[in-house]
Amino acid sequence: MVFPGHIAAGYLTALGVVTFSGIALSPNEQALLLTLGALLGDGPDVDLFYSFFKKKTTNVGALKGHRDHITHMPLLWLLIGLFVFILTVSNFGKVLGILLWLCPWSHLLCDSLFSDVGVAWLRPFSNKGFTLFKRPETFPANWKDLFLTLLKNPLFYLEIFIALVAFVIISIRNF
Ligand SMILES: [Zn+2]
């Protein structure tokens, strides 16, 4: 999954938490939490910037192996979320704690659908990656090839669908 799908999945996860957690929030707090949730949906991919920086290239090859970084470790987000949840007393802080856990997990769940190496859900105890559909490990030569590979992938259209659902919900909520 790529950027728009992750942001949309993060938003939908945050909307689910804000709506169904039963924790009272002001409209402003809700809006801020939904925005943070959307951004956290792509939180695990902050390692891309690190990869670009470290490999000194913005070529597609810099993406290779980026899922080995700590930001793709599910336990990290669970611990950060738990930490914030326990240490804060406000309703806002509690919901933020839940979002810090679940929105990045929506990302990792999406990464577990179709991937070359999958997500190592049990790290640091096991480095075995889990993925529903395994993609060949041959890596596209450039961004254009990566995009063409995506177009041939049915899950890419699922991603567009998720993004559209989020977009429609955002539009309805703001009218
Ligand atoms: Zn990712």
Image (cartoon, helix red, strand yellow):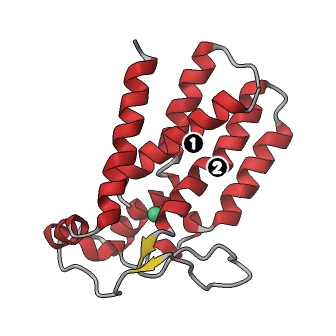
Residue 22, x across and y down, in percent: 76, 27
Q: Which residue is mark 2?
A: 102
Residue at 72% of width from left, 48% of height from top? 81
Q: Is mark 1 within 8 Å of ligand 1?
A: no
Q: Is residue 61 left or right of residue 51?
A: left
Marks 1,2: beta carbons within 8 A: yes
Q: Are there few (<14), some (14-19), or many (20+) residues within 10 Å of tag 1?
A: many
Any mark on residue 88, and which? none
The structure residue drawn at horizontal position 61% and vertical position 85%, both measured from the top left corner, is 128
The kind of residue tagged 1 is Thr
Residue pictured at 72% horizontal, 27% vertical: 92
**Picture layout, residue 145 above or below residue 11:** below
Residue extending farthest left: 144
Q: Position of residue 111 (x, y in %)?
A: 48, 66
Q: Is 33 situated above or below 110?
A: above
Nearer-N-terminus badge (1/2): 1
Horizontal side, residue 72 vs residue 161: left or right: right
SS label for mark 2: helix
CA separation in Å, label 1 and label 2: 7 Å
The mark found on residue 13 in the picture is 1
Q: Position of residue 59 (x, y in %)?
A: 22, 70
Q: Secondary structure at mark 1?
A: helix
